[in-house]
Each structure stands twice: as structure tokens, then as C-alpha cells.
Image (spheres, helix red, strand yellow):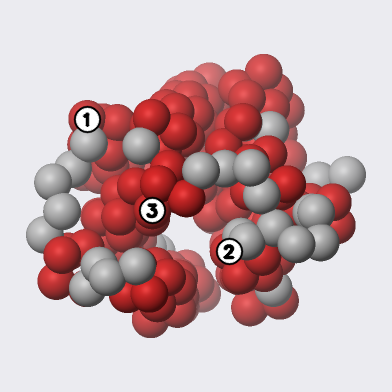
Amino acid sequence: MAPDYGETFAQWRAGAAGSWRDYTRHAFVEGLRDGTLPRASFLHYLVQDYVFLVHFARAWSLAVVKSETLEEMKVCAGTVDALVNHEMALHIKTCAAEGIDEAALFGAAEAVENLAYTRFVLDAGLQGDFLDIMAALAPCVMGYGEIGARLARDKVADTPYADWIATYAGEDYQSVCRAAGAMIDGAVARRIGDLASAPRAHVLQDRFTKATELEVGFWDMGLRG
């Protein structure tokens, strides 16, 4: 059962059902669960994900600029903190153990899939309003929360990726997902009222679905590593 990250997320998730399943049940994810993911693939993904998170944090910072309320600003700023000071720390720690330092992570060349995804999210924020950028950001934040929660329940006991799973299943990250979901619900109600009947609903759904498809591409990229 999917975690409760708010009504808006649930509607967007349902609207992207096929792509969401491909994302959250991807072979890369299942390899994390049972430990069969090649270490080289995981490290390639971690390096690219570190670069991704740099741009992702910038996108959440842009969301602070687009905010209309103090609550929105606090949640978005808190997410930037979670990304920069906590989630990225996992990448640094894991890669350091493999001889890859933080300078190498920051300076890594971006894969095409990384460029496509991060620029799509940033463009959604630059071109659109707060809801546009939230629709583009939500699949990553909530998707990793959902994946982490499921893998924590279903993982093979001796998977070498237990630390990764614990990061996204842990209460700190899950609280970020719940706070973001509640904030998005309030932002939708404040700006457009009922999401299902809003003229912009299909535009926001399209942004969420495309971001989900780009997540699938990111896992594909990881596997090729």
C-alpha cells in the first residue's frame, strides 16, 4: 500500500499509473531490494544522483522564490536542507569508501538522462508557477519515499544496499514527504480550488507524468553503469 503523502499526490500518482509502476518497481529498484544490483551500476547511479541533487536543490530553492505563504517557504527551504545536508551526505559517504571524493562527485560529467530530467524540472519552475514546479518535483521526493518504505518491508536481509533503503524509509525522510504532500494540498486549494475540476489539471498531470517517465530513464541510466 502506498504511503499517505496527501490527496494531490494520490491523484497525480493515479494519473500516471503505468509510468509510476515502471518507476517504483524498476529492475534497478528490485536489485536494491534483493542485493543483485551490480556495485558498478550503483556507484554510477550515486555519482549521477549527486549531480542531480545539486540541480534538484536549486529547483527547490526556486520554489522558495515562487512561494506565496510562509508555510510554503518553510517546507521548500526545509527540503533544500534535507537534500544538501542529509541526502547528499549518503552519496559522499558511500562514494568515499570506494575512493571517489566529493570534488569528483561535484565535477562529474552529467549523463544525458540527468540533463534531460534536471533541466525539465528547472524549466517547469522558470516557465510556470509554484504548482508547475511542485508537479515536476513531486515524483522524485514522494517516489523515493514510497520506494524506501516498501523496500524496508520487503528487502532481503543481507542486501548490501540496506543503508540506502534505510535513508529513504527513515522517519526523517518520510516526514519530508508528508510535509511536502500537505503543503502541496494547501497550495492547490489556495490557487485553483478543486484539482479534479480545475482547467489546469491536465497540465499539472502532464508535468508529473513526464517527470515520472524521466525517473524511469534515470534508473535505466543507472543500470547501464
- The residue at the point 22 percent across, 36 percent down is 111
The part of the image, by quadrant, that contains residue 175 is bottom right
Q: Position of residue 65 (x, y in %)?
A: 27, 64
Q: Position of residue 95 (x, y in %)?
A: 35, 67
Q: Amino acid at mark 3?
A: Leu
Q: CA distance from mark 1 to mark 3?
A: 17 Å
Q: Is disc 3 placed on a helix, strand or loop?
A: helix
Classify residue 125 as left or right of residue 224.
Answer: left
Q: Mark 2 or mark 3: which is in front? A: 3
> What numbered label is drawn on residue 43?
3
The first of marks 2 and 3 along the sequence is 3
- The residue at the point 66 percent across, 49 percent down is 35
Quadrant where the C terminus sits is: top left
Q: Position of residue 189 (x, y in %)?
A: 62, 49
Q: Quick check: marks 2 and 1 in contact, CB under 8 Å?
A: no
Q: Mark 2 or mark 1: which is in front? A: 2
Q: Position of residue 34 (x, y in %)?
A: 73, 47
Task: Please give the count of numbered marks on the rendered protein.
Answer: 3
The first of marks 1 and 3 along the sequence is 3
Q: Residues within 10 Å of mark 3 (few under 14, many from 20)?
A: some
Which residue lies under the disc numbered 1?
Answer: 112
Which residue lies under the disc numbered 2?
Answer: 164
The part of the image, by quadrant, that contains residue 118 is top left
Q: Residues within 10 Å of mark 2 (few under 14, many from 20)?
A: some
Work out whether residue 88 or residue 203 is closer to the camera in this orientation and state it: 88
The first of marks 2 and 1 along the sequence is 1
Q: Is disc 2 placed on a helix, strand or loop?
A: helix
In this view, 213 is above or below 158:
above
In this view, 134 is above or below 174:
above
In this view, 63 is above or below 194:
below
Q: Is residue 31 visible?
A: yes
